[in-house]
Structures are given as structure tokens and as C-alpha cells.
Amino acid sequence: MSLTKRHSSQRQTQREVTLMMPLHDSTFTIMLVEDEEEILYSFETMFTYAGIQNIIPVNDSRQVMGVLAERHVSVVILDLHMPHLSGMDIIRMMGDRYPQIPFIVVSAASRIETAVECMKLGALDYFVKPVEESRLLASVARAMETHDLRSEVSTLKKNLLSDHLEHEDAFAGITTGTSGKMKRIFQYVEAISRTGQPVLVTGETGTGKELISRAIHHASGRSGSFVAVNVAGLDDQMFADTLFGHVKGAFTGAHQKRDGLIVQAAGGTIFLDEIGDLSISSQVKLLRLIQNHEYFPLGSDIPKSTDARVIVATNRNLQEMIGANLFRQDLYYRFSAHHIHIPPLRERTEDIPLLVDRFLGDAALALSRNKPTPPRELYAYLASYDFPGNIRQLQSMVFDAVARHGKGVLSMQSFLDAIGLSSEGSNPPQPLKPVDEQSLLNRNTGRPFTLQEAEEFLIRHALALANGNQKLAASFLGISRQALNKKLSRSKELLAPV
């Protein structure tokens, strides 16, 4: 086969294989162990055309273990019959020291017994030379998936057992306290950060989807930039031009070539926010990008390739949109290889004190003021609020309060105004959290409460919800503090726990 035909065949094979797995991951590394220089060069050329950037060729088997100790290797492809150390020796040593690294055997030995022994030792595949390129590339694609899964499980296991994060600096921009939900998300972020596969981040507006996406990029160790694009409101041409760029003369006014943002994200991460607002025609272009790692600049029929990782985010229910034929199901499955859902602030109110403290510091710095001290009862008020705007809304509340602050303890008035309460409790109160049906029965008799018993129960429940703060409890009940004091004075039993 001529060199030109060979390269053409390799490019076609690469396109077929990337439909199964994205081999353009800039963190994916292959070690080729082969003592015959011609075969080693042939494999190296084939994988280069397949889009794999990191290839470690080794023609002396004695160097393998040293390289594995110093370099991150995703998969090893090795021959069996080599001088010095045989492939079987290397396999056994890898099994002792690096059992997490998958390996593929490519050998001239065609004995079934040899192949069976290699498979028992953990080989993903066994090929007899000469091997078909498409089969070997498909095997490497499976090896990549195996490596990613093993790394993900290993990282999750280690984090869950130790409750420790390896890349704490990646989460420096995200404030969280004792919330177990957020800690589990951080652990999952670390586990998937180096896989290179697309990630879907969902959550309500203001929950911090972009911050989590930046943390994924930071923890991945990618050398390229994090490039954020809000696709809401972009029509098909604007989306393609923004992301993929255009060639000269592509449309009226295109007087010169312009690269899209995907070029800026080379070797890094492209973050597409509000993906649920993308038109169907733009979804087709995005599918091609994720599936083949290829794109077409406007006005060009020559595809370009990219190694940028894709992370998308939305506050919409994509499953419902798929049912309504507003979102492509194949695209959804492509970028939801990893799915992170960020809980709303109302489901992790234990984080509110730390968030308030951080925002107070940020606001004081931005406004060139001393950081004020918040009143203790503020947190109980905030914990009772639903926060439809989530963390972003809390941040706005804190900045507004600091902007109005004069001296002394921080006033709660702006917070009360924002959540619909007045300082006297005369505004419509926030509803109490739901109680179960059994709570409405008298514990002693099993019958429903009398009106007096129900009133006493509600008072105790409001006090518990307000952490003993009578002013806040009164606002929950829709009465004045003086009225509550009168009811409390009639019976000390009301101060007992619910």
C-alpha cells in the first residue's frame, strides 16, 4: 500500500473509531513497547493520525517500569517476544505494581495457550501480527473507557474513605460548609475530571453551575484555557460563528477569516451555558463536535479537529424537552456521560453562615469598608427562606445590606424586606415547613389535637424552627412578638421541645 493510500485509510479508520470513543483526549497517553523499530514507527504513526497526542514509544523493554514510575500512562500496548525482558515479564510486574493500567498484547505468537494465559493475567485484547488497524484502534477506545472507569472508581473510593480532596485549590471559588451533598459533588468532580468525556451540569438558576464547571477544568490538569459561552439567544448562524468561526467571504461583512472560541479552548475546556435554549439545527453541529471532535467554520467544507473538552449546563429539564421533540436524544446521551446536579440553597441551608461570611468579606472589600458583624438571628431568618434565586440571590442580599450599612452590627432590615418579612412580623409570614400526619395526633391518646393543643403544638414547632428566637417564631406564626409572649407566659410547657 502506498504511503498516501495508507494515510488516507488511517484517517478514515480514525473517523470510524471516534464514533465509539473520543480519542482526542489530551490527557490520554499510550505506551508502545516494541523492539522492532519499523513496527514501532508504524504504530506511532497510526495513533497520531487517530488523534492521540501523547504517545511514549519504548524499544527497550528494560525501560518500561521506569517510565511507568515517572509518567502517567493510560494504556500499554506490548509485544511478547523481546530481548532482555519479555512481554510476559512486564505483564506480571505491571500486575503487581500498576494493576489499574489496562494493556493490550500484539504478538507474532499465535498459540491459543499463550493468548489464554495473557487474558487470564488481565489483557484487554490479544492480537496476532499483522493486526488490522481498525481492530486495534477500537480496542484502544475500549481501553480508554476502561481506564477512565477504573480511575473514576479509584478516586471516588479514596475520597469517600478519607473524606479528603486531592485538588482542594480547584474548589477555592466555591464556599461550602458542612453540606454532605456538596462534598459528594466535589468528590465526584475529582473522580471524573481527568476522563476527558463531556459533562452535563444541571441545577436551578444561581446554584453555581459555572463554578463547578471551572472546578472540573482546574482539577483536570489541562494546559488549555477554560472558555465560557452563553448560548441562550443565539440563532444557528450566530452559534456557529461564535463557536466555530468563519472563513473570509462566508457571509456579507466577513472581510477576513475569524477563529471561533473553540480555537481558544484548544487543550482546555469549552463551557456552554444554557444548553437547553439551543436550536435543533445548532444541536446537530454540537453533536458532530462531541461525537467526532470535528467542526466546520462557516463557509468552509473542510473539517477542523479539536481536543477541547465540552461541558454543558442548563436549568431546564432536558428529558421533558426530549419528549416534546425540542432536544435531540442522541445529543443528550453524548454529553451526559457524566452528570452533576447541584442542589438548590434551600436544600443545604447549613452552608448559609459560611456563604454570608464570604459575601460580607467580598462586599466590604468591593465597597472599601470594614467587614460588618451580622446579628446571630439572621441565619435563622435566612434558613427559613426558599431562595428562588439561590446563592446568587443571597450574594445580592448581602451586598445590598453592606451598601446600606453605617456602623455597629449589620442591620437585618434589608434582608427582611427581601424575604417578605417586616421587623415587627406584620407582613405575611413565610409558611411553616410541612409536618407529617402523625404529628397532628395527640401522642398520648392517638386522637386529633384539640384547637388548644394544636395551637400549643404550632408554637413549639415555630420556636424549634427559629432555634428559640421568639421574634422569628412570631413572624412564622403571623402574630406579634407581644402576642407570642402572652401565650408563652400562660404555660412553661410551650418551651419544651416538639
Image (cartoon, helix red, strand yellow):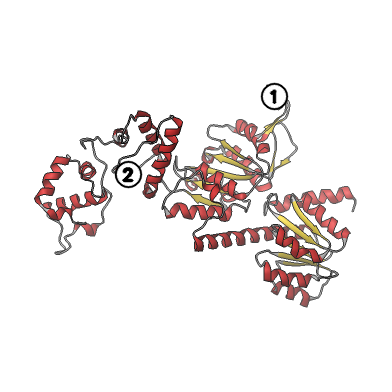
For the N terminus, the image quarter is bottom right
SS at mark 1 in the image: loop
Residue in the foreground of this view, choosing between 328 and 399: 399
The residue carrying pointer 1 sits among few (fewer than 14), some (14 to 19) or many (20 or more) residues within 10 Å by Cα, namely: few
As drawn, 239 above or below 338: above
Which of label 2 and label 1 is nearer to you?
2
Residue in the foreground of this view, choosing between 330 and 225: 225
Viewer can see residue 163: yes
Per the image, the residue denoted by label 2 is: 379
Per the image, the residue denoted by label 1 is: 254
Residue in the foreground of this view, choosing between 418 and 258: 418
- At a point 71% along the width and 72% down the height, the residue shown is 119
Spatial distance from mark 2 to mark 1, Cα to Cα? 55 Å
- At a point 68% along the width and 41% down the height, the residue shown is 266
Q: Position of residue 363 (x, y in %)?
A: 42, 34
As drawn, 243 above or below 131: above
Q: Position of residue 212 (x, y in %)?
A: 52, 46
SS at mark 2 in the image: helix
Q: Position of residue 61 (x, y in %)?
A: 81, 66
Which of the 4 image quadrants contains residue 261?
Answer: top right
Amino acid of disc 2: Tyr
For the C terminus, the image quarter is bottom left
As drawn, 58 above or below 239: below
- At a point 18% along the width and 59% down the height, the residue shown is 441
Q: Is residue 293 left or right of residue 361?
A: right
Amino acid of disc 1: Ala
Q: Position of residue 371 (x, y in %)?
A: 39, 36
- At a point 68% along the width and 37% down the height, the residue shown is 263
